[in-house]
Image (spheres, coloured by chain):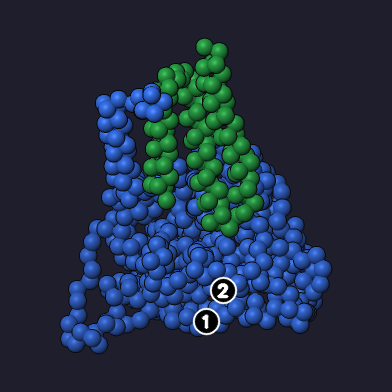
Chain colours: A green, B blue
Amino acid sequence: MWLIIGLIAGAAVLGLVLWMKGKDVAVKWYEWLIGALGLMLLLFTIQNFAGSLAELESTAANMFLLVSGLPAIILLAVSWQLVVRRQRAG
Amino acid sequence: MSTFHSIVSRRDFMKGLGLAGAGIGAAAAAAPAFHDLDELAAQGANFKRPWWIKSADKPTTEIDWSILNYTESFSRYRSPLSSQISDNRAAMRKGGIEQNISGNSLKDVSIASAFSSGRSKVREALTFPGPDINFLSADWGNFIPPRHTGTPEENLNMVRAALSYFGAPRIGVVELNGNNTKLFDSSVRFESTDEPYVDGKVKVVPTSVKYAIVFSVKQNDVMGRHAFGLAEEGPYKGYAPFLGKATVYEAYYHEAMIASAMQLFLRGIRYQGLPHRAVGGTIPVPWGVLAGNGEQGRVSCITSPEYGNAIRVTSVILTDLPLATTSPMDGGVREFCKTCKKCADACPSGALTQEEETSWDVLSFEGQPFNRPGIKSWRLNWQKCVDYGSPRDCMRCQVACPFNHAADASIHGLVKMTQATIPMFNGFLANMDRLFDYGAAMDGEEWWNRDLNKWKHDELRGFGNKGW
């Protein structure tokens, strides 16, 4: 399962990088960093959500969506918006 | 036109393909061989613990060997309410069955008790001094093989491999000495003799039998969660369902099976194999602590960072097979117990102390101590525990432990690493365990209707670890 998730994540990142290069979108190092942290947190959330369900801990699974999933989405959104807004301003 | 054409150059495209291919190759190469740090550390070794479980010179429980001595007479707490407790228990069972209460119905009580007499029967196979050393000769005719030889390290590997196959992958070895032999009461005597023998009421063990193999028998902690929720009304008001107790008897049954197999194995390679259930005169928890199977937690039983409180027993087999010994462990468990107190919160009778620090003091009833002196520990108030009806009617302390968790979610590995190395986070981690509601009670009827295609928590003999 994690091989497939890794392939999908890798392909998505590669696709994004190639697309941004094509559109001449410049990304600052800190925007990369925030995005990478968001992605890692998202993967962490997915693993622990699935793992908690496997352990029959449904409350813990839902708590992971809130405690780490939400910050992951926020970080990814922040990274995205930083890039987009700088593009518009630039 | 440019909107219809990709402006990725051929060079960038090929570079991307190469990177993706390298990524796939790396993932494929790494995936089957390395799932986590534990596995990486264990490659090439018979068994290795995670790096954050340290070996210690002494157990994390302080022991005063000048006081701790099982040859001194000692009486367990005997409740003056024992007939009332029995009547209460009978009423609970009757009420649960008649009202078909989930977790306490006839099928629940029956399955929970299913291993109880089997446990006793298999224990009868544990004999002192053990089966004839030539017990395999019926198949081999006149051939009597020489004794197995190996270095102590090789023998430890061999014993570990055998016990893992029998069902106990966590073991330790203690060399008997003048201190730890005090853990045997006067019904056991060590003597310079060739073979073990019985002298009246005393079991005589040769002094050549100098090693104690200690193996942990795990309980099914998921099954244990079916003995956690306290009923708010009805015949079981204030008590947990009985269904989850199935794992207790099952684990004792396993202990007897594993000990019997190990006794025969040791005799087969032509060494002594004396299970403590056959020798008598000692209790398992101290051996587990000395051997490094775990630490003594707040509950006073053995707690390991791998199994938590879900260890039914750390069973002992004495042998003269030369063995490398194992050290006590420091996995941060006892330190975590100081602030966690989840078991004490779960205890319905208040038998577990909420004190943060341990003490040399013992508790007593009518002037008679019911805790052994000689260790600095949290003391279980046996009067409160037994008067409530425990240990038969309750196992909540065992179920509540945060270290019980399975290893599917990666957070547990991170938490265990953190608690073992940075104790200042222990309080926070214990509170998060409560917030995430780990170890919550499970329903009996749902257990009977579990999806057997997906359920991972039954023991399936012959399936090994991978469920194949």
Q: Residue at x 53, y 26 (%)?
A: A80
Asked if B96 appears above or below B15 in the picture, the reply is below
Specify the amino acid type for callout 1: Gly
Disc 2 packing (10 Å; few <14; some 14–19; many ≥20): many
Q: Which residue is mark 1?
A: B118
Given residues B354 and B127, the one toward you in this image is B354
Quadrant containing the C terminus of chain B in the rendered view: bottom left
Quadrant containing the N terminus of chain B in the rendered view: top left
**Which residue ends up furthest to the front in the rendered image?**
B1
**Which residue ends up furthest to the left in the rendered image?**
B143
**Which residue ends up furthest to the right in the rendered image?**
B233
Instruction: Give the Cα separation between the discs numbered 2 and 1.
Output: 9 Å
Residue A41 image point, x, y percent: 52, 36
Examine the rendering and report whether any part of residue B371 can be seen.
no
Q: In terms of sequence position, does the residue under pointer 2 or pointer 1 come before the other?
A: 1
Specify the amino acid type for callout 2: Tyr
Examine the rendering and report whether any part of residue B135 can be seen.
yes
Residue B29 image point, x, y percent: 29, 45
* Disc 1: host chain: B
Given residues B413 and B45, the one toward you in this image is B413
Describe the element under mark 2 as helix, strand or loop.
helix
Residue B159 image point, x, y percent: 33, 63
* Contact flag, marks 2 and 1 (Cβ < 8 Å): yes
